[in-house]
Image (tube, helix red, strand yellow):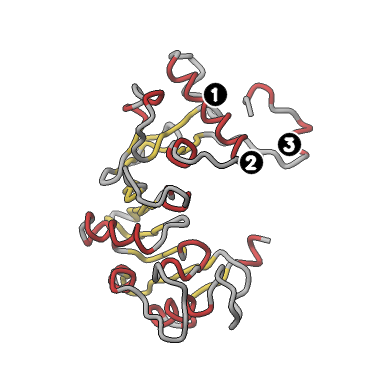
Amino acid sequence: MIPNNYSESDKKKGLIIIDELWFTPRIFSKYSSELCNEAKIIKKEAERRIKLFRSNDQLKSKAGNRIRVIGYSDNPDLEGLESITTVPGNTVNLVNNDLKDDFYFYIHAPFKDEDDENDRNTTSVVLQACFDVDGENRAGLAIFGGDSDCQIWEKILDSSDDESLEWDLLLAPHHCSWTFFSEESHDDNQTPSENSIDFLNKKREGANIISSSKPVEDDDDNLPHFAAAEEYKEIVGEDIFTLRWNILK
């Protein structure tokens, strides 16, 4: 939505303006399947903001027009966006046109190339948010993994140091799906990958895990998955594995 066109009617409808849009081009450029209406809207809005940047329009840095590209892209149409692009292995502390000295994001993913061309989940942004508080560096660390699966986390562990993998708060990937723990469907004998457990053990004292999902039941659903929830509880304890369904409804 163009900020200047935002009306009182839009506000009443609950429509919002995103001050700064973080955009992963690979989520659209690599896949040929039909986009849902929401995806079409996001893609169109990203293209509008990129056009403003390319033309050096004076409005490009205004709230509602800002954009940051996350991850690599092989699309030649996106060449020339280096100054607003952040790729894995780098940090960014310029957030919404405000340079932070007590906060930064470390970008873990998406990576440049993935094997599964039919799974958009491989394009998920994975990042660590680092907060300094009252003079203490890295006082709070939160990791958000989007819908990333076991294969992505294996690559993250291979390419990242321990400091960038530590966490106090983890949003369970893919809404507490079993895909974080294994590429295979779960059965009674299925065990989590060593990589997933290694990452979870990067937790710091007092760590918490949040599942943004419907209530976790002992059934065959995978989203959320009961066995996945049990694995998380094993790592941090049942009392601090938190469900955030009521807030999200």
Name the spot of residue 148 as percent of width and height, x first. Answer: 42, 57
Q: Is residue 217 above or below residue 109?
A: below
Around disc 3, counting alpha carbons within 10 Å, would you say few (fewer than 14), some (14 to 19), or many (20 or more)? few
Name the spot of residue 175 as percent of width and height, x first. Answer: 53, 64
Q: Quadrant of the N terminus?
A: top right
Q: Please identify the quarter of the rendering in which residue 30 is found.
A: top left
Residue appearing at x 32%, y 44% in the figure = 113
According to the image, label 2 marks what residue? 38
Work out whether residue 110 or residue 69 is closer to the camera in this orientation and state it.
110
Residue 102 visible (yes or no): no
- Inspect the image, locate mark 1, and give the three-letter code of the amino acid beneath it: Arg
- Helix, strand or loop for disc 1: helix
Q: Please identify the quarter of the rendering in which residue 142 is found.
A: bottom left
Residue appearing at x 50%, y 34% in the figure = 20
- Helix, strand or loop for disc 3: helix
Work out whether residue 228 or residue 100 is closer to the camera in this orientation and state it.
228
Q: Is residue 161 above or below residue 49?
A: below
According to the image, label 1 marks what residue? 48
| Of pointers 2 and 3, the one earlier in the residue sequence | 3
Work out whether residue 31 or residue 49 is closer to the camera in this orientation and state it.
31
Dot in front, 3 or 1: 1
Left or right: where 14 falls relative to 116: right
Name the spot of residue 105 as percent of width and height, x first. Answer: 35, 47
Which circle marks residue 11 in the picture?
3
